[in-house]
Structures are given as structure tokens and as C-alpha cells.
Image: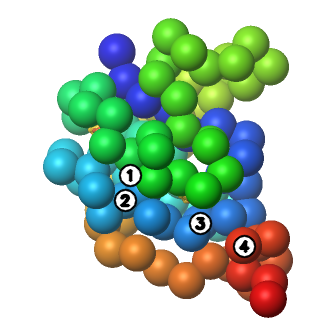
Amino acid sequence: MSYVVCEPCRDCKYTDCVVVCPCECFYEDERMLYIDPDHCVDCDACRPECPVEAIFQEMEVPSKWTEFIALNAERVDAIKASHGPITEKREPLPRSPLARG
Ligand code: SF4
Ligand code: SF4
């Protein structure tokens, strides 16, 4: 079992989530973040930190976003080949709604 990053994370990368993870589970590409299902310990620390409610426990992923369960695992495997986990908070992407104002 694992936590899963879903659609609302696209273009956000506000990254409040990564600093609370005790297991360095988060990986990023140019669009969003993903959780490594092999290292997530289901601690729930990241979920309430996400300002756009993009993170769900695997069993609670809304049906419209179930493809993100496999996508997180696939993207983490691909990203791991060249990059380590993201563990420090970053500024949001310029196009993120959270970056405005
Ligand atoms: S805080 Fe939420 S939206 Fe922002 S990077 Fe983390 S999971 Fe994505
Ligand atoms: S549930 Fe815990 S271990 Fe899993 S990604 Fe979130 S903070 Fe990390």
C-alpha cells in the first residue's frame, strides 16, 4: 500500500509535501511529483500538507484518478534511473495558481 499523487499536482510543485516525508519518497519530472510506492510507509504526513489536496492513500484515490496509482510507480521507476528523490521545498512553478499574487 502507498500514497499516490494525483491530477491536482500538475503544474504546482509547491513541494510542501516533500519536507515532511520520512522516507524520501517523492520524485519529480517537469509536470508534477510522484510517490515511490516501494518506500512509502503510509504515515499520512504528506497528505495534509498539500494545499491542493493532490495526495491520497491508494485505497482512497478518487475513481477519476485511479490511473495515477500506476503512473506514480511507472514514473518513479523511470526518474530513478537519472535523478534522486526531491527532499527540499521549492518555489512553485510560475504557471502554478499558487505562484500568483
Ligand atoms: S504539495 Fe501537493 S501539489 Fe504541491 S508538489 Fe506536493 S503533492 Fe504536488
Ligand atoms: S505517506 Fe508518509 S511515507 Fe508515504 S509519501 Fe507520504 S510522507 Fe512519505
Q: Are marks 3 and 1 in contact (CB under 8 Å)?
A: no
In three-dimensional space, the C-alpha distance between marks 1 and 2, rounded to whole angstroms, equals: 6 Å
Farthest bottom residue in view: 101
Label 2 Cα neighbours within 10 Å, binned few <14 / some 14-19 / many ≥20: many
As drawn, the label of residue 98 is 4
Taking 84 as reference, is 14 left or right?
Answer: right
In three-dimensional space, the C-alpha distance between marks 3 and 1, rounded to whole angstroms, equals: 11 Å
Q: Tag 2 or tag 1, which sits nearer the N-term? A: 2
> Is residue 43 something one can see in this rendering?
yes
Q: Is mark 4 within 8 Å of ligand 1?
A: yes
In three-dimensional space, the C-alpha distance between marks 1 and 4, rounded to whole angstroms, equals: 20 Å
Q: Tag 3 or tag 4, which sits nearer the N-term? A: 3
Q: Tag 1 or tag 3, which sits nearer the N-term? A: 3
Q: Amino acid at mark 2?
A: Val
Q: Is mark 3 within 8 Å of ligand 1?
A: yes
In three-dimensional space, the C-alpha distance between marks 4 and 3, rounded to whole angstroms, equals: 9 Å
Look at mark 1 in the image and give the residue it sits on.
26
Taking 97 as reference, is 20 left or right?
Answer: left
Whole-percent x, y for residue 65 in the image? 73, 24
Which type of secondary structure does the marked residue at label 2 adopt?
A: helix
Q: Are marks 1 and 4 in contact (CB under 8 Å)?
A: no
Q: Is mark 2 within 8 Å of ligand 1?
A: yes
In three-dimensional space, the C-alpha distance between marks 2 and 3, rounded to whole angstroms, equals: 10 Å
User: In the rendered image, which quarter is residue 55 located in?
Assistant: top right
Q: Is mark 1 within 8 Å of ligand 2?
A: yes
Look at mark 2 in the image and give the residue it sits on.
18
